[in-house]
Image: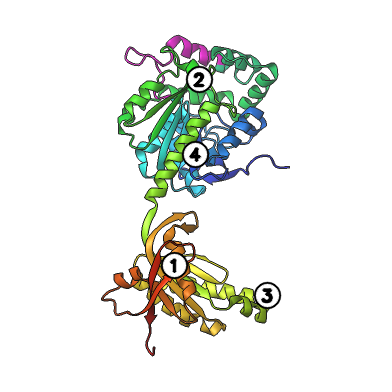
Amino acid sequence: MRDRPEIRYVLTEDGVHIGYQVFGDGPVDLVYNDGWMTNVDAGWDIPSYADYLRALGRRARVIIFDRRGFGVSDRPTSPEEMALEKGMDDMRAVMDAARSERAIAFGFEAGAAVCLLAAASYPGRILGLLLQAPLVYYWKTLDFPWGSTEAFAKEWEDRLRTSYGTEDFWRWNFESMGYSAADEEVWMWAKWSRLCASPQAALAIEQVERQVDVRALLPHIHVPTTVMLKAGDRGDDGMWGAAPWVAEQIPGARYEELPGGGHFSDASDTAFFEVVDRFISEISSEQAELDRVLATVLFTDIVDSTATAAVMGDTKWRQVVADHDRLAQGVVGRFRGKFVRGTGDGMLATFDGPARAVRCAQAMIEAVKPLGIEVRAGAHTGEITYGGNDLAGIGVHVAARVAAMGSAGEVWTSSTVKDLTAGSGLTFEDAGEHELKGVPDSWRLYRVVTDGD
């Protein structure tokens, strides 16, 4: 039985295949840039990491990928082919393939630099930044006391050359981070690292990370940002201790220190997920507000659809509905509207001009007559919210209720539509005030008068 998301590939503009996965069903997209190494397939074999990913997937639609050189992606090994800009290009290609127009970018360790570069280069595609233990510059200096010393960098490179992928390497690595790992866990991570990269690739990414310096970008980041760090990493001489300083450099960024030692978060890290939940909630609320637009909503409804379906039979009725939807898409397009979806016995569309919505409804009434059906229509102009492939908001409910008021061949509208179409040549007949089911207040409705009425 499959216990992990399907792996897909996207070909980048420079001809590199990047492997990625998409999972989860939260309210926003979250593209996760993990730190030093990745393998989107083998990561699911480590129970603690798999649980961590699933916990993220309960909060967002998560997109994970292997940067070039790692895991299931193509493996160029020269530092030039694996530069930071290439990692950003890989991320953008994966977002395109996953049909993610905008996403929260979550960067851990070196993955934070890729996310920061993406937010600076393509701010319209990044909803916000979550950064944990961000690596923004590799070296410890007088004015940046959080990086690596020459001595540690040499020891790290020597171990990559002589013991990368072994249990000895991982036991030393965990101990250097103050983390105590059981033998079984050490064995799993050693195996995982061999599947992530060869020793040559590991050395190449080390050379790339030594050139990382995105400090100049920080004041130019203008998306909501939260920077996190485990309390055990807080020391000024720690490799990751720059997190509070990073948050200070980004306008409006929030710094969150997570309790406990160690370096990683897992599925049991309550404090970590409280921060993630709050950030996603804030972004979701902001996006819902920004996604609210003024539009004219048009519903059409096949009159007596249940009785007609019974007379026609299931097979013929399905064909009639399919023909109806095909015609509807063409008519809506003719009047420069957006066909949102068929409703099974009608359709839902939006327009940026109310007069075009009314004329579309009139054209639709005539277009479906050869199918042996009649439709009625209702239109209302109000605020709506786009969500995925559907609409939400009071404007949608009002339009649906208005459509239900008419008879076969009629177009009814709210007073808003009537008022906004003054001078269009359309004629309206007052249909009185009505209570609309599930909608507050009473509504003045109008019937569109056609030639011959």
Q: Which residue has dot 1 on it?
A: 399
* Quadrant showing the N terminus: top right
Looking at the image, tell me whether mark 3 or mark 1 is earlier in sequence order. 3
Compared with 30, 349 (above or below) is below
Looking at the image, tell me whether mark 1 or mark 4 is earlier in sequence order. 4
Q: Secondary structure at mark 2?
A: loop
| Residue 306: x %, y % from top left | 62, 75
**Residue segment shown in magenta:** 135-159
Compared with 61, 241 (above or below) is above
Q: Secondary structure at mark 1?
A: helix
Task: Give the spatial CA distance, label 3 vs label 1.
Answer: 29 Å
Looking at the image, tell me whether mark 3 or mark 2 is earlier in sequence order. 2
Residue type marked 3: Asp
Look at the magenta stretch and give its main secondary structure: loop
Q: Which residue has dot 2 on it?
A: 259
In this view, the residue in front, 232 or 17, is 232
**How packed is label 1: few (under 14 Cα within 10 Å), some, or many (20 or more)?**
many
Mark 4 and mark 2 in contact? Answer it, CB < 8 Å: no
Dot label at residue 314: 3
> Residue at horizontal 33%, vertical 12%?
142
Residue type marked 1: Ala
Looking at the image, tell me whether mark 1 or mark 2 is earlier in sequence order. 2
Mark 1 and mark 4 in contact? Answer it, CB < 8 Å: no
Q: Which residue has dot 4 on it?
A: 31
Which-is-in-front pick, marks 4 and 3? 3
Residue 145 highlighted magenta (yes or no)? yes
| Residue 194: x %, y % from top left | 63, 26
